[in-house]
Image (cartoon, helix red, strand yellow):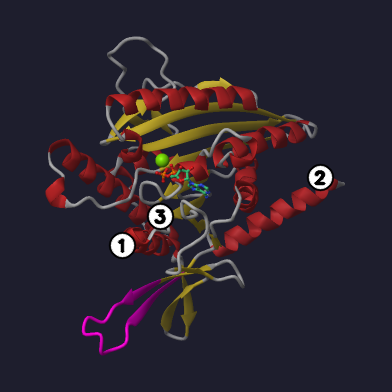
């Protein structure tokens, strides 16, 4: 009985998503270091969908009043500094679940370094502070177990890649050789994206995946020590490929759940970035802006989507577009000195979330946003 209700809830969720388009943007504001929020960040309490950044311009003469400029944004959901990992996950659990219904699901964390991307995606190891990845994995295996009672059999394959300077690195690599294998993104004859020489690990329970995540973190921190602050300048992509068969009902499904911690979106000062830093900056800016372009092209159902313009979107081509569901977290740091970066992030995210639908009225076409 409970299961029938759950199925209905999921069906409704999928229908609503189809109506509204498959792209969602959630904003999450990290607390100040001592907790709370400064005055310049205001969150709507009525519907949890709006955020305002207020900028006070001090009058220099002292004779005129200070002026305040408000920048207003609205998203599918805005989480304030007190939102727990549990609350955040509750909002996306149906999305995660739909990966078992055959939908590709892609979830990104976007924002400047220090804004809470890794906290949101991975979190800490303590139960309550675990982030999206471990919670999603837990949910998938739990739900797959329930579906098993209805005759479904699933196989799961996990992979974990880092993209640094447009180069792929296998985070599940365990070889000892200092010369690591090189990787290329390829398309199979059935149009699926694969990566050459990558570790694709067959997994069958939550603990195995958590073990792989720990291995990936170890791999990342080794590179991090060799190269200061590297992890904030690379994208990390966790993928769980899911294949389900229900022999009794003669049905199959296949999908991928993709969880991505993006490189820091901060703009570096050009004059300060030379050599390697300049190369990194160019790679990051290029791939993040291409991600925005790809998502916008998909939302607007454009015929050409420039997936191949960056490694990140090429790699994710299979889980973006088509019947996939995309969720972007835009993570925000509330400190006043992050104002400029925060404004940039919110602008980027609202471009991504502006899904336009053509509505025909007489001879003219009105573009309407459903948000
Ligand atoms: P990023 O990955 O974007 O560089 P982090 O996730 O590492 O940022 O977050 C920076 C710091 O802030 C970390 O110490 C993290 O634990 C803390 N933090 C981030 N978001 C939250 C939050 N919602 N609640 C409490 N602490 C947070
Ligand atoms: Mg991080």
Side of 146 where 124 appears, left or right: left
- Whether label 2 lies within 8 Å of ligand 1 gets the answer no
Q: Looking at the image, can residue 314 be seen?
A: yes
- Which residue is at 53% across, 61% downward? 21
Q: CA distance from mark 3 to mark 1?
A: 23 Å
Counting residues from the N terminus, which is met first, the one under dot 2 or under dot 3? 2
Q: Which residue is mark 3?
A: 295
Q: Which residue is mark 1?
A: 340
Q: Which quadrant of the figure has residue 161? A: top left
- Whether label 3 lies within 8 Å of ligand 1 gets the answer no
Counting residues from the N terminus, which is met first, the one under dot 2 or under dot 1? 2
* Mark 1, secondary structure of its residue: helix
Q: Which residue is mark 2?
A: 3
- Which residue is at 30% across, 77% downward? 57
Local crowd size for mark 1, using a 10 Å CA cut-off: few (<14), some (14–19), many (≥20): few
Residue at the top extreme of this rendering: 176
* Mark 3, secondary structure of its residue: helix
Q: Looking at the image, can residue 187 be seen?
A: no
Residue 145 location, x and y as percent? Answer: 74, 31
């Amino acid at each position: 009985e409970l299961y029938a209700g759950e199925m209905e809830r999921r069906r409704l969720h999928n229908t609503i998503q189809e109506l509204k388009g498959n792209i969602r943007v959630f904003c999450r504001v990290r607390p100040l270091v001592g907790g709370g929020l400064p005055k310049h960040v205001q969150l709507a309490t009525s519907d949890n969908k709006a955020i305002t950044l207020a900028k006070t311009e001090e009058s220099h003469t002292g004779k005129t009043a200070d002026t305040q400029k408000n920048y207003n944004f609205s998203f599918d959901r805005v989480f304030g500094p007190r939102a727990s990992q549990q609350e955040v996950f509750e909002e996306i659990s149906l999305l995660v679940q739909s990966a078992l219904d055959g939908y590709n699901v892609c979830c990104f964390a976007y924002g400047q370094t220090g804004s809470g991307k890794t906290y949101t995606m991975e979190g800490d190891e303590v139960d309550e502070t675990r982030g999206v990845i471990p919670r999603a994995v837990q949910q998938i295996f739990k739900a797959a177990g329930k579906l098993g009672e209805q005759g479904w059999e699933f196989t799961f394959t996990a992979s974990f890649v880092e993209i640094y300077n447009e180069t792929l690195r296998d985070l599940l690599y365990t070889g000892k050789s200092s010369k690591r294998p090189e990787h290329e993104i390829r398309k199979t004859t059935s149009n699926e994206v694969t990566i050459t020489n990558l570790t694709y690990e067959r997994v069958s329970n939550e603990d195995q995946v958590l073990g792989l995540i720990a291995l990936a973190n170890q791999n990342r921190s080794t590179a991090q020590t060799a190269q200061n602050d590297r992890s904030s300048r690379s994208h990390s992509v966790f993928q769980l490929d899911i294949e389900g068969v229900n022999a009794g009902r003669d049905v199959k499904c296949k999908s991928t759940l993709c969880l991505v911690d993006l490189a820091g979106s901060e703009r570096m000062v050009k004059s300060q970035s030379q050599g390697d830093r300049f190369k990194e900056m160019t790679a990051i800016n290029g791939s993040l802006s291409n991600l925005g372009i790809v998502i916008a092209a998909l939302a607007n159902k454009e015929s050409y989507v420039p997936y191949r313009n960056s490694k990140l979107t090429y790699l994710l081509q299979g889980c973006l577009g088509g019947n996939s569901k995309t969720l972007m977290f835009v993570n925000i740091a509330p400190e006043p000195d992050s104002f400029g970066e925060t404004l940039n992030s919110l602008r980027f995210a609202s471009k991504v979330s502006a899904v336009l639908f053509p509505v025909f009225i007489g001879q003219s076409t009105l573009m309407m946003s459903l948000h």
